[in-house]
Amino acid sequence: MGKKGKTGRLKRNPAPRFWPIPRKQFTWVIKPSSGPHSLKNCLPLSLVIRDILELAKTRKEAKKIITQGKVYVDGKVRRKDNFPVGLMDVISFPGINKFYRVVSSHKGLFISPIDAEEAKYKLYRVEDKTILKNKNIQFAFHDGSTILFKSEDSKNLPDVNYETFDVLKLNLPEKETVEKLKTKKGNFAIITGGKNIGKNGRIIEIEKTVAKKRRNALVMIEDDSNNRYQTIMDFIFVIGKTKSLISLPEATSSV
């Protein structure tokens, strides 16, 4: 009889390489549940607590912390210990006054400590825009979440001028728009994939696309040391205008 569906287990060796786990000491590792981020672009919550932040020694202890409602992700309590956290997610521990943001680094994803004020907002990149039958507009973000703008008049679209690759600064957990950042020359951005992952700086050039998808357009960024890095639009995540709106780890920051 053939296998049905996906396996609920994950061996350590094929797990994403940026996970800070010993590969040969044990066979199995926590597999993230289905959620806002794909397997290759996330970390299970209990692994963050046990192996990265070292707030627990075992998965059982980490699971207890989570099920007691002591852990918030993007302002909401998460009680599943295998909940996947990924790029730009805010992980909060109000009981011990500790806050973290998931950012890109040269190794993959990095859990960067932030202060309580910065934990009040998150950056979302617009991935898709859909106009519904009732003239409402729905925007899909990089973490799988969506936001709906309702039309007051069924004959006219709501006055919302967001485009694909725009980045919205939304407060948590209400998700009200605080600021909009466009992916354009002069803005500050971080590279989220490819060989230059984790590099950041100002966008100095964006290729004009005619015969290929905009996601594959070449983008050049320059850091404060005048080093230049080239990647594609799909790997560019704008994080500020005159300066970064989020804290970056020393290994990632170009400052």
Image (tube, helix red, strand yellow):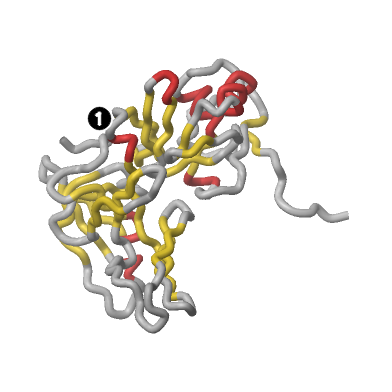
| CA neighbours of label 1 inside 10 A, class few (<14), some (14 to 19), many (20+) | few
Query: Which x, y percent locates residue 80?
Result: 60, 35
Look at the picture and state if 104 lies above or below 188: above
Look at the picture and state if 35 lies above or below 136: above
What is the three-letter code of the residue carrying label 1?
A: Glu
Residue that protrudes farthest toward the top in the picture: 57
**Quick one: 59 or 209, which is closer to the camera?**
59
Query: Which x, y percent locates residue 163?
Result: 31, 67
Labels in figure, total: 1
Residue that protrudes farthest toward the right in the picture: 1
Q: Residue at x 23, y 60 (%)?
A: 182
Look at the picture and state if 235 lies above or below 117: below
Q: Residue at x 66, y 31 (%)?
A: 28
The residue wearing badge 1 is 250
**Quick one: 165 or 17, which is closer to the camera?**
165
Image-based side of 97 in relation to 40, left or right: left
Q: Residue at x 15, y 44 (%)?
A: 243
Question: Dot 1 lies on which element?
Answer: loop
Image-based side of 219 in relation to 71, left or right: left
Residue that protrudes farthest toward the bottom in the picture: 155
Image-based side of 190 in relation to 45, left or right: left
Q: Is residue 19 visible?
A: yes
Q: Which quarter of the picture shows residue 88? A: top left
Quadrant of the drawing holding the N terminus: bottom right
Q: Is residue 12 visible?
A: no
Quadrant of the drawing holding the C terminus: top left
Q: Which quarter of the picture shows residue 60? A: top right
Query: Which x, y percent locates residue 125?
Result: 35, 56
Q: Residue at x 25, y 48 (%)?
A: 239
